[in-house]
Each structure stands twice: as C-alpha cells, then as structure tokens.
Image: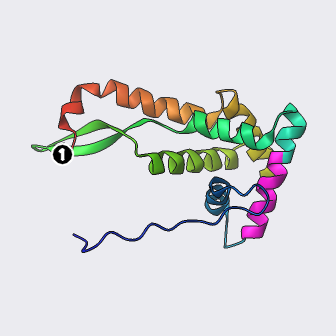
Amino acid sequence: MRKAKPKKRYVLPDPKYKDTLVTRFVNYMMVDGKKSTAYSIFYDAISLVEERTSENGLELWKKALGNIMPSVEVKSRRVGGATFQVPLEVRPGRKTSLGIKWMIRYARARGEKTMKERLAGEIIAASKGEGAAVKKKDDTHRMADANRAFSHFRI
C-alpha cells in the first residue's frame, strides 16, 4: 500500500481555445513527444468538422466526446474461486479518459488518408451517435447490463 496519494497533475489550457480538455486530448493523441504536430492535427480536424457540418467544431467535438464517455463498466472480481464481471459506476476523471482514448483509437483505425480526416470523421460520426467509439460505449453498457445480477459483489 502507498504511504501517500500522488498529487494530481493539472494541465495547462491549449493556446487557441484556452481549454484544458483540449490539452488532455492532444496529450493522449501525441506520438513520440511531438506536441505541436498533435495540436496541428487537432486544430485541422476541428476546422474540417466546421467545414463539413457548418457548426462550431469545438462544441461538436465536446458533444461527440459526451456521446462516447461511458457511465458504467465491468470489473473482474474474484469471489470464492470464481471470477465475476461486476458492473461499477465510472469516476468522472476515468470517464473522460476512456472517452478520449476510445475516440483516438477508433479514429486511428478509420480508412481515411490523413489523421486529421480520420479524427474529423470520427468526431462527426460520434456527434450523431454513430461510429466505432459510440459502439464501444454501447457494448460496455450492454456488458454491464448483462452482469447486473452480480452488482451485489461491488467493492
């Protein structure tokens, strides 16, 4: 067991929108420490979303992220030699982390040519409530719903 809980690290807001959530997203998207490249991909994707939908790109991205974030998940719990999938509520910090990770993972898996096009496509799809990341959230919720019988094993 740890002696003390580690201090929470806070990220600085991004230069364009002055939003810390954007910085968190860019930090997750960044590869090999290339933050400026990650920022340019994100900003280009947002402008591409605005072009395609004629709506505010940042608001659409936040709506898409809200559609992806799960509210319940399952965790494995061993009770008397058997392993049960126990449904649990997701903490707010973990909720945003999972949403960001899923959006980036499924954007990378898309078929478009550049990352900004893939990210823009995933944002537009998620804001409509479709796309692979929203499907992942629905699968997670379905799994939690199917294992509701084991909710009394909660920690």
Amino acid type of disc 1?
A: Arg
Q: Position of residue 33 (x, y in %)?
A: 67, 73
Q: Residue at x 85, y 39 (%)?
A: 50
Image coordinates for residue 20, horizontal then vertical, percent: 63, 58
Q: Nearer the viewer, residue 25 or 55?
A: 55
Which quadrant is the C terminus positioned in? top left
Q: Is residue 48 visible?
A: yes
Q: Residue furthest front?
A: 18
> Where does the image place residue 65, in percent across and percent down from the top left?
62, 40
**Colouring used for the render:** rainbow
Q: Would residue 41 be found to the left or right of residue 62 on screen?
A: right
Q: Quadrant of the N terminus?
A: bottom left
Instruction: Indicate whether 33 appears above or below 140.
Output: below
User: Would you place residue 15 above or below residue 89 in this image?
Assistant: below
Nearer to me, 121 or 20: 20
Q: Is residue 42 magenta?
A: yes
Residue 48 in the image: state x and y as whole percent: 86, 44
Q: Secondary structure at mark 1?
A: strand
Residue in the picture at 19% in, 32% down: 152
Which quadrant of the structure image shows residue 23? bottom right
| Location of residue 63 (image quadrant) | top right
Q: Is residue 145 left or right of residue 42?
A: left
Determine the main secondary structure of the stretch shown in magenta: helix
Instruction: Identify which residue, 95 or 121, lies in the foreground.
Output: 95
Please give the residue where the numbered disc 1 appears in the rendered image: 78
Q: Residue at coordinates 42% horizontally, 26% vertically from top-left?
A: 142
Residue 114 is at least partly visible in this image: no
Q: Residue at x 34, y 25 (%)?
A: 146
Q: Residues within 10 Å of mark 1 (few under 14, many from 20)?
A: few
Viewer-closest of 108 and 121: 121
Report the magenta residues as a range: 35-46
